[in-house]
Image (tube, rainbow, N blue to C red):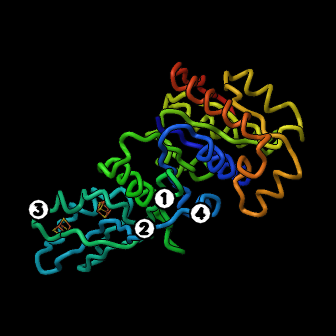
Amino acid sequence: MIVAVASGKGGTGKTTVSASLASVWPSPLVAVDLDVEAPNLHLFLNPEISVQEPSYIEIPEIDDDRCTRCRACTDICQFKAIGIFGDVVMTFPEMCHGCGACWTICPEKAITSGKRELGQILIGRSGQTKFIMGRLRVGEAMSPPLIRNVKRHLNNGNGYADRDVIIDAPPGVSCPVINAVMDADVIVLVTEPTPFGLFDLALAQKAFAPLGKPMGVIINRADIGTRDVYDHCQQTGLTILAEIPFQRDIAEAYAQGQIIVDTIPALRPLFETLVARIKTLYDHQRPCKEVRYA
Ligand code: SF4
Ligand code: SF4
């Protein structure tokens, strides 16, 4: 089973939940940090990193002598990453999504694939849990290809096939998080009972509903704010999987980079129940209703 922990909004406690879920998960696990712009999961899990390797995107390299300026490549590129200006053919590597259409279509075989570094992939182990994370190069805008490269490690027969997977997904509702959750079996949304939490939860629900995956919600800092998040979940058929209380000792554990379920044993039953509810959600395969507002 692949569980993606996501949130429409940053700062809801998504990584805190991911780390505690990894701690209580009963079967062999891979913990994957796909929040590649600001990966934090390793700060909780403290993995021993055994492999650190660069991750690349393929980009076009043009042989100026072969190129006849036919414009087939500029016409097919959806991202304006190749242009012909007068007699000059230029590439814009930062805008290239590495789809390969240009070098596939070039009639003169004037384009070969080069590469551009996106960031790093780090692989290791935290106790019995295998760990993978992507870390985007500072200033790099193209995070989805790095996310896909990290996920390829899961599919490449690296001993992960018999393990459940917990993904700490990026916040938001745009391409990075869609790439992160699209292969998941269950999406767990972490929110808080505030107007901001509600607004961004509804956005996330709307973004993920077309994927047709079972979704549930964890309400963090559950005893502050309003009941609007609860009403919203009831109205849209979104299962509330757990409520994490607003407590000083939880905030203190978080502030010290500790896994809250390890520091505060009283939270363990809450997270064990959460695991059981995620599995039930997965077994029943009940996709959430499509949300038509927000
Ligand atoms: S498709 Fe090939 S030959 Fe045509 S403009 Fe592009 S690089 Fe040149
Ligand atoms: S690889 Fe795709 S995105 Fe990149 S320049 Fe070629 S056609 Fe455009």
- Circle 3 or circle 2, nearest the eye: 2
Quarter of the figure with residue 38: bottom right
Instruction: Mark 3 vs mark 4: give the one in front.
Output: 4
In this orientation, which residue lies closer to the viewer: 264 or 92?
A: 264
Report whether 44 appears left or right of 114.
right
Q: Are marks 2 and 1 in contact (CB under 8 Å)?
A: yes
Hey, what amino acid is under mark 4?
A: Asn
Q: In which quarter of the image is ligand 2?
A: bottom left
Q: Which residue bears the numbered disc 2?
A: 50
Q: Where is residue 41 in the image (x, y as percent from the top left)?
A: 60, 58
Q: Distance between the residues labelled 4 and 2?
A: 12 Å
Q: Does the residue labelled 2 lie within 8 Å of ligand 2?
A: no
Q: Quadrant of the C terminus?
A: top right
The answer to whether the residue labelled 4 contacts the one labelled 2, judged by CB atoms less than 8 Å apart, is: no
Q: How far apart are marks 3 and 2 (CA)?
A: 44 Å
Q: Residue at x 63, y 40 (%)?
A: 204
Checking the image for residue 125, the label placed there is 1
Callout 3 amino acid: Pro
N-term mark: 2 or 1: 2
